[in-house]
Image (cartoon, rainbow, N blue to C red):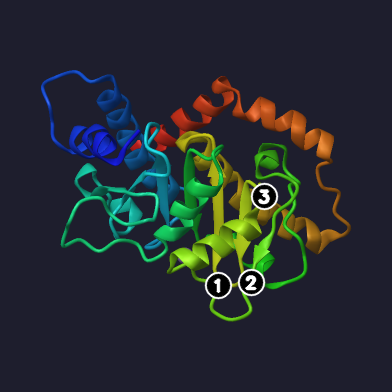
Amino acid sequence: MDRRKFLMGVGSLAFIRSPIAYSDTSLIDGLKSELIIANKILSNQGVFDAFGHISFRVPSGPGAFIMSYSKSPELVTLDDLAVYDKLGEPLHQSERVSFRERYIHSELYQSRPDVMAVCHHHSDAIIPYTVTNTPMRPVVLVAATIGSKIPTWDPKDYLPFVNSAEKGRDFAKSMGDATVALLRGHGCTVVGAGIREVVMTSIYLQRNALMLSQSLALGKVKSLSETEISKLRKILFAPDSRDRAWEYWKHKLDVM
Ligand code: MN
């Protein structure tokens, strides 16, 4: 798809409310609504605080994605969302400020065709695993989605902070095909096949970190095997499990 056609398909349809029912528009509108809920769920669950961001890939736009402008995630509304191109720059001129670390998202969407959503956060629970030699590994069944190989990005020449496309490329290269990657003394990035999968993995990554820390204090830890991880990922990402978790976390917002 050429750029003009793409801009017409994403930029205008996503942001100008048209009375014509475009299937792409309803799909993107649905994803945008989910993104707002995801921001609130991850804040409500203590994964996000003032910082952290989550995005989704525009299905028909190679490398383009939708994410909020710079704002605390719990406060994000539909009016705060912007479309970014594959280089991580906003498609539309605006006075609004973008997240400095948007290149985490742009570079992962470019290098990983399997990735449809990306979340970056600074959950306290995972920080100890970014600054010690103790590896993060899944020990809780519901955390099998984090996978067995979790690399830590610790660049030699600059802070582990992704404020340029070049650093984004370096981070994405170090992440490889993993679902989760840690950033030394900073936080982590989670990718997945959709917004719900990324929310689920982010929440259970945090829970797993807490349980792993408690287990390590007691003694030798037996983590999930490769076979167990593989089997459990299929079960956890099955629509019934994934959607049950989503509805539960969403309900926690509704009743508050
Ligand atoms: Mn960060």
Outermost residue, front direction?
2
Q: Quadrant of the N terminus?
A: top left
Q: Where's residue 214, x and y in %?
A: 73, 58
Residue 224: tell me if it is visible: yes
Query: Is the residue marked 1 within 8 Å of ligand 1, measured from its CB?
Result: no
Q: Quadrant of the C terminus?
A: top left
- Which residue corresponds to mark 2? 154
Labels 2, 3: front one = 2
Of label 2 and label 1, which has the lower sequence position?
Answer: 2
**249 left or right of 222?**
left
Give amino acid for label 2.
Answer: Asp
- Which residue corresponds to mark 1? 160
Residue drawn 66% across and 52% down? 176
- Which residue corresponds to mark 3? 208
Q: What distance separates the C-alpha of mark 3 from that of mark 1? A: 23 Å
Disc 3 to disc 1: CB gap under 8 Å: no
Q: Quadrant of residue 184?
A: bottom right
Residue drawn 29% across and 36% down? 6
Q: Nearer the viewer, residue 256 or 88?
A: 88
Disc 2 to disc 1: CB gap under 8 Å: yes
Q: Quadrant of residue 27?
A: top left
Labels 3, 1: front one = 1
Q: Where's residue 252, x and y in %?
A: 41, 37
Residue drawn 41% across and 41% down? 56
- In what element is the residue under mark 2? loop
Q: Quadrant of residue 7?
A: top left
- Badge 3 crowding class, 10 Å Cα cut-off, few under 14, some 14 to 19, many 20 or more, is many
Q: What distance separates the C-alpha of mark 2 from that of mark 1? A: 6 Å
Of label 3 and label 1, which has the lower sequence position?
Answer: 1
Q: Nearer the viewer, residue 207 or 66?
A: 66
Of label 2 and label 3, which has the lower sequence position?
Answer: 2
Residue drawn 72% across and 43% down? 140
